[in-house]
Amino acid sequence: MRSTMRTIRPAWLVAVTIVLAAIGWAATELTSRASLALPVLPLSSLITMALIAIVCLILGLKVRRWRDGNRDKVLDPLLAARTVVLAQACAYAGAVLFGWHTGILLDQLPTIALRADLAVIWQMVALMAGALVMVAIGVMVERFCKVPPEDSDPPSTPRPKRESHGEEEFA
């Protein structure tokens, strides 16, 4: 059985973002009613997001270099497959984080004028920017890992219909 990996679908990234924005908005409503702090990640999470994105990019560049003809070293196919999976995970994690913080920000927009301290708003904006970087790097690295079709490959043509072998055809 041959398994093929699907590429990232932008529509799925948008859907994840919208669903998580709704969940983030609802979570903010609930925490506000309970007089709890906003459910926003700390700024230190930007370091983790950056490390994931950097590792993904480094591995992706290694695969792209090999794909583009720099084949001094053998590329481990398992490393290439893991790089694609990491790229997809990076993109989807970025969509989750962007959606979550967008939902929280949308809930807080009506109260921005009443806030004396806008630090948490800028924190959300920074986390949203980091999440967009993760999505962009994930999509880009996934594209790095695509192997272009070989010139020697035959062009894909539709298979001819099967001929009947002694069977009667009905019109």
Image (cartoon, grey):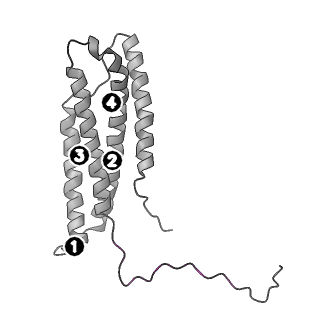
**Whole-Å distance between the Cαs marked 4 and 3?**
19 Å
Mark carried by residue 91: 2
**Whole-Å distance between the Cαs marked 4 and 1?**
42 Å
Residue 62, how many percent across, how many down?
20, 63
Answer with mark 1 or mark 3, whichever residue precedes in sequence.
Answer: 3
**Whole-Å distance between the Cαs marked 3 and 2?**
11 Å
Mark carried by residue 52: 3
Q: Residue at x 40, y 31 (%)?
A: 21
The residue where tag 4 is placed is 101
Q: Residues within 10 Å of mark 2 (few under 14, many from 20)?
A: many
Answer with mark 3 or mark 2, whichever residue precedes in sequence.
Answer: 3
Magenta segment, prevailing SS (helix, strand or loop): loop
Answer with mark 4 or mark 3, whichever residue precedes in sequence.
Answer: 3
Q: Which structural element holds mark 4? A: helix
Mark carried by residue 131: none
**Residue at the limit of the structure toward the bottom, as seen here:** 166
Nearer the observer, disc 3 or disc 2? 2
Q: Residue at x 36, y 38 (%)?
A: 96
Is residue 30 in the magenta section?
A: no
The residue where tag 1 is placed is 74
* Image quarter of residue 33: top left
Answer with mark 2 or mark 1, whichever residue precedes in sequence.
Answer: 1
Q: Residues within 10 Å of mark 4 (few under 14, many from 20)?
A: many
Tell me if 9 is positioned left or right of 94 in this view: right
**Residue 82 in sight in this render:** no
**Whole-Å distance between the Cαs marked 2 and 1?**
27 Å
Nearer the observer, disc 1 or disc 3? 3
Q: Amino acid at mark 3?
A: Ile
In the rendered view, would you say 132 is above or below 123? Answer: below
In the rendered view, would you say 112 is above or below 127? Answer: above
